[in-house]
Image (cartoon, grey):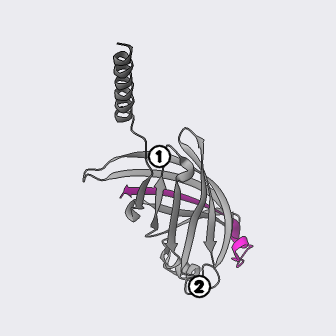
Amino acid sequence: MQSIKATTAGYLITALVLLAGLLNPAVAAETYKLDPAHTSVVFRVKHLGVAYVYGRFNGPSGSFVFDGASPASSSIEIQVDALNVDTAVEKRDNHLRSPDFFNAAEYPVIRFKSTSVKKAGPDSYEISGDLTLLGKTRPITVQARHTGEGKDPWGNYRRGFETSFSIKRSEFGMNFMMGGVSDDVLLTVSLEGIRQ
C-alpha cells in the first residue's frame, strides 16, 4: 500500500513538473537579423561651437542574439558603410567620405561587435564591445534600452533596442578641422530586428 502511494506521488510530482515546464517554457536565445529600413544610425556633431549638425548612415546591417533568461548569452554585431554617410548636403557628404574624415575608400566599413552583455535594469542592458573606425579598434561600453517586441502584419516577430553614446573622433585618428568640428560626436543607434 505504501509503495502504491509512493508511486502515485512520484507520478503526480512528475506530471506537475512537466506541466510547469509547459506553462513556463524556458526562454531560449533568439537570433534577429537587422531590418535596415527600420534601423537608424544617427550622429550629431557641433559646428564652430555654434550649432549641431546631424547626419546618418543609410543601410546598416548586422544581427543580434537576445537571451532574456541569460543576458550574458546575448550579443550584437552591426556595421555601416562609410560611403553611405548622409547629412542631406551632397558637397559635405563627399568631403566626409574623403581622407579628411571617414576615408571611405581605404576604410569602407565602420563596425561594432559586442564582447559582453549584462542586465542593467528592467528594460536596459550594459553592452561592451569593440568599435572599429578608420582601421582603429577601441573598446566602448553603452547602455541600451529594450524598446519593444511583437508580431508584425506579415507573421514575423520583431524586437527593438536603442542607445545613445558619445565618442571622441580624435581617438580613431579623425583629427581634421578640430577647431571647426567638435571632437565629441553623439551617436544614437535604434535597432529593429526580425527573428530568424
Identity of the residue drawn at 39% across and 30% down: 17
Up/down of 119 relative to 75, above or below: above
Which one is nearer the viewer's eye here, 18 or 157?
Answer: 18
Circle 1 SS class: strand
Membership of 194 in magenta stretch: yes
Residue 94 versus residue 138 in the image, above or below: below
- 114, 48: nearer the viewer: 114
Q: Amino acid at mark 1?
A: Thr
Nearer the observer, 181 or 85: 85
Q: Give the labeled residue for mark 1.
A: 147
Question: Dot 2: few (<14), some (14–19), or many (≥20) neighbours within 10 Å?
Answer: some
Residue 180 visible, this angle: no
Front: mark 2 or 1: 1
Q: Secondary structure at mark 2?
A: loop
Q: Amino acid at mark 2?
A: Ser
Residue 146, image x, y percentages: 49, 46
Image x and y of residue 31, in percent: 42, 57
Q: Determine which of the numbered discs, if any, sits on residue 135 in the image.
A: none
For this view, does 22 lie left or right of residue 54?
left
Question: Which residue: 40% across, 65% down?
Answer: 36
List x then y, in percent, for residue 41.
Answer: 51, 63
Residue 24 visible to the viewer: yes
Q: Quadrant of residue 102?
A: bottom right
Q: Residue at x 58, y 61 (%)?
A: 114
Left/right of residue 61 with respect to residue 93 in the rendered view: left
**Mark 2 and mark 1: span between their CA atoms?**
35 Å
- Residue denoted by label 2: 98
Judge left or right: residue 35 versus residue 75: left
Please say whether residue 162 is one of the residues in the magenta stretch: no
Q: Which residues are drawn in magenta? A: 169-196
Q: Residues within 10 Å of mark 1 (few under 14, many from 20)?
A: some
